[in-house]
Image (cartoon, rainbow, N blue to C red):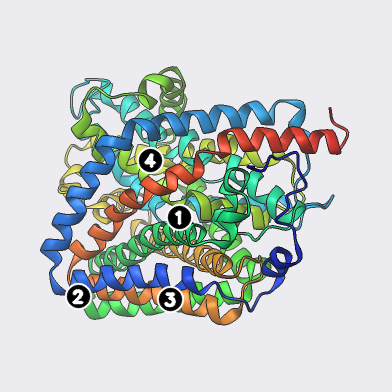
Amino acid sequence: MKPTLDLSLQASTESTRAAATAPSQVDWPVFLLSGGMIILFVGMAVVDIDALSSFVSVSFSWATKYFGAYWQVLLLATFFISLGLAFSRCGGVRLGKQDVPDMNTFKWVSIILCTLLAGGGVFWAAAEPMAHFTAPPPLFGTEANAAESVYPALAQSYMHWGFLAWAIVGSLTSIVLMYLHYHRGLPLKPRALLYPIFGDYVLRSWFGALVDAACVLAVIAGTVGPIGFLALQVSFGLSELFGIADNYLTQLVILLALIGLYTVSAVSGITRGIQLLSRFNICLALGLMAFILLFGPTAFIFDAFIQSFGLYVNQFIPMATFRANLAWLDWWTVFFWGWFLGYGPLMAMFIARISRGRTVREIVIMISLLAPVVTCFWFTIVGGSGIAFELANPGVISEPFKGMNLPAALLAMTQQLPMGFVISVLFLILTTIFVATTGNSMTYTVSMVMTGTDHPATWLRVFWGVMMGLVAAVLISIGSGGVSALQSFIVICAVPVSLILLPSLWNAPQIARRLAREQGLR
């Protein structure tokens, strides 16, 4: 008989509890499966990058063709169900079996924003609005490079980095994982998301190992990609700003520094290194936001944000369900959805780890509402400023950006500001630390998967941190094609991962109602 959430979860036996509390017990099948697949991918890239790229391209097309519409519905359902829980009486449910949160709100918010926004939130913030401005999305049908294209360009960027993207990486799934781990003693692993359906079988079988390995593989692909691209992008920036040679040696030095930074912070733990990096980055981001608002196109930024956000809300459902141009959709909306879905289970684990003592309402409002609004405003400040400069001086941003040159778009924008050189350097630092916070949090979380505990062994954190950096180093040694292939590979990994996330749509509400009764809220 399949278990129900009204049972006391028979998996909370002595063996299961031991697995949940033994930091030195490594799940070797998951370790070997996930590590082996990454090594196989890198080996194929080194032997024949063209064949690998062809395989990834075909698989990518298959994934978007057969799962793209499902992903669009899944993200919409996750967002609206999470809001329903937050604003019901279940919203007052406190998770993690403790009454006081582990960390104060500013630290908690800093870690969430830095981890989930990551380096993409800097380079894409500059590049994506410009991409939609110069080639308007088909839903809006506006003229390229025209004033009427400003608001649709920003609104489409909000769609890709806003409510739906954030909701899928930690709203409902965090609720499920926090309940099963902290309240019922199950191991903190992605396979726990399927426990309400498969029971003990998923905890102890090869099937559970495959579930965990698929989720780990998706996150490693999604994290190694930004690590590799950061080395390429920062190397480009240093060449433009300081005349340093943009070659593999420079990229390798950047990579080694980044590996050291995020591995040390992952080893020091969430309450120390990860938290300190996140707080520093948030303060730096706030300082840069304030500078651009004061010395950049201030009126344009506020006008564009209000108008574009209104358009985003008004066209929310049409943008989220758009299927009329599949070629455009696959390389924009569905690509991003696959990317965020791939991160879903492990991001939920990380949020569960840092959110103990928080209520359902706090978690959902932070993840599904406040963080997306902050992200949209950030995109307006960075990308909106680029559009404002482009309107005033056509070609000043779009010419360097040609060919989707993300770092060139960012540097072209910062160079238009007062103290452009200094601001450009600070943005490179900001991006580096954004990627480092994603690297350290995912290193920590992958290590949690290997042990099922929220305090994984130090040697595991060091191993995965160094391994992800070395994979990035090998891939960029054969050119950007290797990193691009791995970046696209996360969309393929999102196929099984999206099926693992699906049961949370009904399990999270059941859990919230159960805890509401236990805590006297219903």
Instruction: Specify few, some or many for label 4: CA neighbours under 10 Å numbering under 14, 14-19, or 20 or more.
Output: many
Could you tell me the amino acid type at mark 3?
Answer: Ile
Decide which of 490, 481 is in the foreground and name it.
490
Residue under circle 1?
118
Distance from disc 2 to disc 3, alpha carbons, whole Å, reads 18 Å
Going from N to C along the chain, the mark reached first, 1 or 3, is: 1
Residue position for label 3: 259
SS for callout 1? loop
Query: Residue at position x 22%, y 49% from top?
Result: 59
Contact between labelled residues 1 and 4, with CB atoms less than 8 Å apart: no
Give the alpha-carbon distance from disc 4 to disc 2, as whole Å.
32 Å
Residue 116 image position (x, y, % from top left): 50, 51
> In which quadrant is the C terminus drawn?
top right
The picture places residue 385, in percent across and down from the top left corner, at 35, 40
The residue located at (69%, 63%) in the rendering is: 16
First reached walking from the N terminus: tag 4 or tag 2: 2
* Three-letter residue code for mark 4: Trp
Amino acid under disc 1: Ala
Q: CA distance from mark 4 to mark 1?
A: 16 Å
Q: Nearer the viewer, residue 288 or 70?
A: 70
The Cα–Cα distance between marks 4 and 3, rounded to whole angstroms, is 27 Å
